[in-house]
């Protein structure tokens, strides 16, 4: 789809990768919007139909119980060699029982070129696993995403009785994803926000309630009204039907330094409320340049509560740097010297990071590169600092998300600090 485990560094990191927070901020579904679920990359590499009354199916997992399935997306085109008959779209539950079926004219949806079409279905409540099946009867070429590794959720099926059929196609199953998606929704959370100034900072009280009990997380963004940029982000993990949360913004903003140069405010986040790990207390999105002859990679840097760098992970899950302290936690039997030799790809005075600033209206922009000034043993000399925010007026945005993809935002009035 478009944990903390001591045996896996990457699994620990990927759950809290800061670019996910940014994508939720810019792209997350607002309350009431349809949420799309799919397992392909969106671009057809080929088109196939199957014969003998068989069809294509994709196994989906509902993001919450009683999730409302409203539409089905299909990437395909007409078979020009066929006199068009009908195609059949079916929804099956996890036990292969028929939930919904419709027959329709392929010419009403598909054309001579591969394209995405959306087919309305009556609102269907689905929970857990369910199947979307397309029996095209040679009338439609269904788009196929071909890659080195698939989701393993694409199947060949047949009806009467409903069953998973043999995969005897030209392309192997472990590298093929059918281009079928689903769109649906669930009740969005209800959110209240209360903001007041206190001795330790600006106190943000958040009340969240969700009718279907699938609350997921809450995030605050502190926005400098005059500069129109985000200076502080903090996120907490929540669950269940109701949550009462307290955030405290210490009237500070994030900066980063390599001991010689400093930049800020940068787009970073307090993520202690997500994972509880002191080595992942703060995260900052960046562009990694391992060396001048290698391409840029998007990633995130992780800092402890004192601001020391402890990890650098790219968006594909590859660990480029891990501190000796953190390695003792995730892999206590490992030798740091050997780990450094075998795994760490960053180099002192060679590798550079470009951090971001975030504007609610203008999106992300990049600072100049910061070179990693010291060796991995000394945390590359990179330090996240929290400095006093400039006097002025600030807006607090609160976003609450649920596991079904809804995101609800609330904004405070301007808060003045001096």
Image (spheres, rainbow, N blue to C red):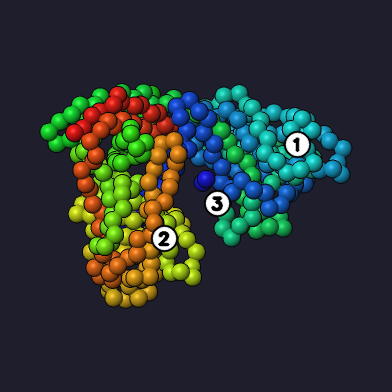
Nearer the camera: disc 3 or disc 1:
1
Residue under numbered circle 2: 288
Q: Nearer the viewer, residue 286 or 183?
A: 286
Mark 3–mark 1 distance (CA, rounded to whole Å): 25 Å
Q: Are marks 3 and 1 in contact (CB under 8 Å)?
A: no
Judging from the image, what secondary structure is the residue with disc 1 in? loop
The residue pinned by badge 3 equals 151
Residue 361 x, y percent position in the rendering: 44, 35
Tag 3's secondary structure?
A: loop
Q: Is residue 303 left or right of residue 164?
A: left
Vertical placement of residue 282 versus 26, above or below: below
Q: CA distance from mark 2 to mark 3?
A: 28 Å
Tell me where residue 244 appears, x and y as whole percent: 25, 28
Q: Nearer the viewer, residue 120 or 31?
A: 31
First reached walking from the N terminus: tag 3 or tag 1:
1
Specify whether residue 95 is in view: no
Would you name the residue on which mark 1 appears? 110
Q: Which residue does the image show at 28% across and 71% down from the upper left?
A: 375
**Quadrant where the C terminus is found in the figure:** top left
Residue 319 appears left or right of 61: left
| N-terminal label among 2 and 1 | 1
Looking at the image, is mark 2 or mark 1 nearer the viewer?
A: 2
Callout 2: SS? strand
How many residues crowd mark 2 within 10 Å: few (<14), some (14–19), many (20+)?
many
Packing grade of label 3 (10 A; few <14, some 14-19, many >=20) is some
Question: Measured from the top left, where is residue 136 in percent x and y?
Answer: 74, 39
Q: Earlier in the sequence, mark 2 or mark 3?
A: 3
Task: Classify residue 34 as left or right of residue 241.
Answer: right
Circle on res. 14 = none
Q: CA distance from mark 2 to mark 1?
A: 43 Å
123 to 179, vertically: above or below: above
């Amino acid at each position: 789809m478009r944990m903390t485990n001591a045996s896996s560094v990457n699994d620990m990191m990927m759950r809290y990768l800061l670019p996910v927070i940014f994508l939720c901020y810019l792209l997350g579904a607002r309350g009431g919007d349809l949420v799309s679920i799919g397992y392909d990359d969106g671009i057809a590499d080929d088109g196939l139909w199957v014969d003998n009354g068989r069809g294509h199916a994709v196994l989906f997992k509902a993001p919450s119980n009683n999730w409302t399935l409203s539409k089905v997306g299909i990437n395909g085109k007409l078979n020009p060699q066929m006199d068009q008959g009908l195609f059949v779209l079916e929804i099956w539950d996890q036990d292969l029982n028929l939930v919904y079926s419709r027959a329709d004219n392929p010419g009403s949806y598909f054309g001579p070129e591969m394209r995405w079409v959306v087919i309305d279905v009556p609102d269907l409540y689905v929970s857990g696993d369910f199947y979307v099946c397309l029996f095209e009867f040679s009338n439609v070429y269904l788009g196929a995403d071909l890659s080195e590794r698939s989701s393993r959720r694409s199947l060949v099926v047949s009806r009467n009785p409903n069953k998973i059929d043999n995969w005897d196609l030209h392309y192997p199953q472990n590298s093929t994803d059918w281009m079928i998606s689903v769109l649906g929704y669930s009740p969005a959370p209800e959110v209240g926000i209360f903001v007041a100034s206190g001795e330790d900072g600006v106190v943000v009280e958040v009340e969240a309630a969700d009718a279907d009990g699938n609350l997921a997380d809450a995030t605050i963004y502190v926005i400098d009204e005059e500069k129109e940029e985000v200076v502080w982000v903090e996120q907490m993990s929540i669950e269940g039907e109701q949550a009462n949360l307290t955030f405290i913004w210490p009237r500070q903003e994030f900066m980063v330094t390599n001991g010689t140069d400093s930049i800020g405010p940068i787009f970073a986040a307090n993520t202690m409320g997500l994972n509880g790990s002191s080595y992942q207390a703060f995260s900052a999105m960046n562009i990694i340049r391992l060396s001048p002859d290698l391409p840029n990679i998007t990633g995130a840097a992780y800092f402890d509560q004192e601001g020391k760098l402890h990890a650098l992970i790219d968006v594909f899950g590859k660990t480029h740097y891990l501190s000796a302290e953190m390695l003792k936690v995730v892999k206590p039997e490992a030798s740091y010297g050997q780990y450094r030799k075998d795994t760490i790809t960053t180099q002192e005075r060679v590798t550079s990071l470009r951090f971001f600033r975030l504007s609610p209206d203008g999106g992300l922009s990049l600072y100049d590169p910061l070179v990693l000034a010291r060796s991995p043993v000394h945390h590359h000399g990179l330090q996240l600092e929290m400095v006093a925010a400039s006097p002025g007026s600030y807006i607090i945005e609160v976003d609450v998300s649920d596991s079904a993809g809804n995101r609800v935002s609330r904004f405070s009035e301007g808060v003045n600090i001096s």
